[in-house]
Structure formats: C-alpha cells, structure tokens
Amino acid sequence: MIRGWIDFKMTETMKRAQKNNYWRTQSVLLLLLVTFQATHTFGQKGNPEQPNIIFIMADDLGYGDIGVYGQSILKTPNIDRLATGGMRFTQAYAGGSVCTPSRSVFMTGLHGGHTVARDNVPHYDTYLEEEHVTLAQVLKSTGYATGGVGKWSLGDAGTVGRATNKGFDMWLGYLNQDHAHYYYPDYLDYNDTILGLPGNTLLRDHYSHDVLTNGALNFIRSSADQPFFLYVAYTVPHYAAPEEDEHGLTVPSTAAFDGNQWPTSAKKYATMLDKLDADVGRITDLIQALDLAENTLIVFTSDNGGHSTTYKPFNTNGPLRGYKRDLTEGGIRVPFIAYWPGHIPDGVVNEEVIAFQDMLPTFAALAGAKAPENCDGISVVNALLGNAQEEHHEQLYWEYGHCRARFDQAVRLGNWKGIRLGKDSRIALYDLSNDVSESLNVAEKNPDVVRQIARIMNAEHVPNERYPVGERYDGSAIWQNESPFSMDKRKGN
Ligand SMILES: [Ca+2]
C-alpha cells in the first residue's frame, strides 16, 4: 500500500518533472528557434548550411597591385576592405601562369599536369568534354543556382565545353578567350545565344567590363532567395587587341588619372584597376543591401601574375620575380582574399599554402556536395574559417610552354621551390622561407632536394596528346573578329 502510494507519488512527480522538462525543453527550443530565426531567417536570407559563393577573379592582376599587398601608388579601397574585414592569404597560387590552364585547374580541381587545358595554345574549340566534371556542376548538383560572367576559355559557343553545358545556369561574357581581347565587342555570349551590341565596336557605347558587372549584379538579385555560386571572371587589367587600342589597354577614359605624370598606358592600367576595385565594391554593396553578407563567402583573386609591360613604378608583382607566363612566383603567386562576416575573422593574414585546385573541394565542402574522387586539391575550409588546417599540401606542381619554344616545370615542396626552364635542363632551387624573390639558386648545396623535385616533375606531368611537348605551335586564333551584324551577314552571304 505504502509502496503503491510512493509509486504513485513518484509517478506523479516524474510526470510533473517530465512536464516541466517538456516545457523547459520547449522553451529552450523556442528560444533557440527565435534566436536562430533572428540571426538566420529574419536577419539573413538563404540557407546558412549552404552559403552563397562569389569568386571574383581578375585577369593578369599582379601580387603587388592591391593596397593590402603593398601597392603604394594605385588605390584599391574596396578590395582592401574585403581583406581588413576578412582574410588575406600570402601564399595562394593560381592554377597556371596564363589564363586557360589557370581556369581549367580552378574548374576541374586538377593541377596543371593533369587538367584538360594546359596552355593558351594550341587553340581548340573546346577543352572540356562531357566526362569532365566542373566546380559549377558539383555545386549545381546540390541545389545551387550557378552564374558566371566574363572570360570562360574552356569551350566555345556551340561546343560541349560551353559554360552552360558545364554547370552554369547563366553565362554572360566571352566563351572564347581571344574574343575577350575586345573591350568594345559588338556581341557577348549570353547563355546559348548572344547579347547583341550592334555598332559597339564603332560607337563604343558599352564597355564590356560594365556589362559584365551589371550581369553579375542581376544574377545576385535574381538568385537571392536560394544558394548561389557566382563566378566573376573579369577581363581587366588584361591587355586588349592592338587594333582596338594603341596601348593595348582599352578604357573609356583616363580622366581620373590625367593629373599624374605617367605614360598614357599607365593611366589606362590605373583606370582598369580603378574600375575593377569600384565594381568589387558594387558587388559587395549589393550583397550588404540584400542582407546576404553573413551568408555569402566572397573571394577575390587573380588568374595569374602581372604582365611584364606594366608601368614599372607600379611594381605589379611586388617582391616576386617574373611575370605572367613565368613559373617563378611572379607568374603564379596571386592575391587571394576571403570575406565572410561572422564566419571568417577580421583582418587575418594567413600564410597557409593554397592553390586553385583547392577551390573545388573547398566549395563542395561548404555546400555539402561531394567532390570528384580524383581531385588534386584539398579542402581548405578550416584555413578559411580561421581554424587549424590539418591537411596541408606536401607539394604543388605547375608547367607551361608545351608547344612553345621552351617547356618549363615548377614544384613547390615545403618552402623549397624548384624550377626547370626547358625540358631536361638543370633544376634551379630556391628557399622561399628566406628568398621569396628567388634570387639565390641553392641547387648545388641541396642535391637530395633537387633529385626529389625532379622525381615529382616527372611524375606529375602526365603527357597529353593535345599538348605535345617540344612541338612548336604556330596557328592563329580560332575566334575571328567578324561582326555578326555585318552587312554581308544581313544579306545572307
Ligand atoms: Ca590571365
């Protein structure tokens, strides 16, 4: 009897406790829900589990061109703000020393000795085939809206490798990279058709960089309610075709820099950089205005090093030796800034060695998507978020010049950098820990390191029949500057 009463009391107590716990639990859940919603639903749009990713890549922008990387003459306040409010990497590497391989490495997650497009030449109408998986396809497969503007380089209009067949819902710009040498084109590729700009070559109404930025902004506006990936492959400050501009640097006006005692080409370069910086600011401002900042990772970088003809006082590659096309650091080490308020700590300078092939596994990890198994890159999510990065690159590999006068290879192994200029030539060795300018060849003192680097060079270069080493290519561009609006075409000729 007593036992029964105790049992009863216990049961009632337990029930009350359970009830209290239930309500306490519910209250905590409700509070969490309100907090969560205040942070993520009412304060933020989109799914925080799948952040938006905006990858802004300049063209031929050097390591030293940006204020936070030491530029002292030209001003880049908007790009600098991404670094002061985010993370700046000092040892980030492009996929190659020129446009096409760098973009191929970024899109495929395979390094320059494995990826499908190894150099800007020979010219092919497509590089990507049906079996090649791109970063855009990976993100699209997990529900991302995918858009791109600018220079694609990996497959022309009508080919299997065109952007809209390789994962992009929207592409506005230049599928063929020789087309991208024209800043006043009379058309741009737009999805599987063209955006006609008839008369533009003559009248110069539409500077292509402005059109690309408008396309990027409109893609953000139209994708704001779902996770999106935006690839902004700008074409500045790359040179223009000489028939379009006598200095090879087409801009609408150099008025903002005319007070400087610089050559005209320098004023034009400064104008390109100024427009680039302003448009990075427009993209960042729109993300802020749409209340997407805490749910959007913005990366700013360049596809390869600065050009050798850039006005010398600008010091385009900072302390680094060499330029675009070189495998010394000046050709491949690039500015790399990651900005994501609330996720990436402010003003961090990160010395982690990262490379373009890491972007596919990194973005896939952020999106909750599966990266292809044969990827050469590693996820650097932890480095990006300011956490301890457990996996590091043991080595990095680049190559350039298969069908040119000289085939070069380079390896980074820890802080060692080995470079071979010309097939079967001797390897020069530099210690980047105390010689970032690669000025002192220490190969003779470190024969074991040189042998190890030689083995890596031999192993990582996988021959590709489209890039036969030593066979000089002298073909011209496939894309021809012929207007789709010419009178001949109207007549049906
Ligand atoms: Ca480039």
Image (cartoon, grey):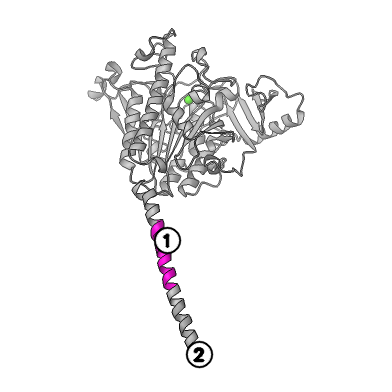
Residue at horizontal 40 percent and vertical 62 percent from the top: 27
Amino acid at pointer 2? Ile
Q: Which quadrant is the C terminus positioned in? A: top left
Mark 2 Cα shell of 10 Å, populated few (<14), some (14-19), many (≥20): few
Residue at horizontal 49 percent and vertical 34 percent from the top: 104
Residue 164 pos. (x, y %): 37, 39
The reply to whether callout 2 and callout 1 are in contact (CB within 8 Å) is: no
Between 349 and 258, the one lying in front of the other is 349
The numbered mark, 2 or 1, whose residue comes first in the sequence reads 2
- Which circle marks residue 28 in the picture? 1
Residue 21 falls inside the magenta stretch: yes
Please determine whether, in this image, residue 283 is positioned above or below residue 253. below
- Which circle marks residue 20 in the picture? none
Mark 1 Cα shell of 10 Å, populated few (<14), some (14-19), many (≥20): few
* Residues drawn in magenta: 18-32
Total number of numbered labels? 2
Amino acid at pointer 1? Val
Between 263 and 134, the one lying in front of the other is 263
Residue at horizontal 59 percent and vertical 30 percent from the top: 398
Q: Main secondary structure of the magenta part?
A: helix
Please determine whether, in this image, residue 318 is positioned above or below residue 13. above
Name the residue carrying label 2: 2
Residue 214 pos. (x, y %): 32, 30
Q: Judging from the image, what secondary structure is the residue with disc 2 in?
A: helix
Q: Judging from the image, what secondary structure is the residue with disc 1 in?
A: helix
Q: Nearer the viewer, mark 2 or mark 1?
A: 2
Please determine whether, in this image, residue 11 is positioned above or below residue 217. below
Residue 244 visible somewhere in the drawing: no
Between 382 and 171, the one lying in front of the other is 382
Residue 139 pos. (x, y %): 43, 45
* The image quarter in which residue 397 lies: top right
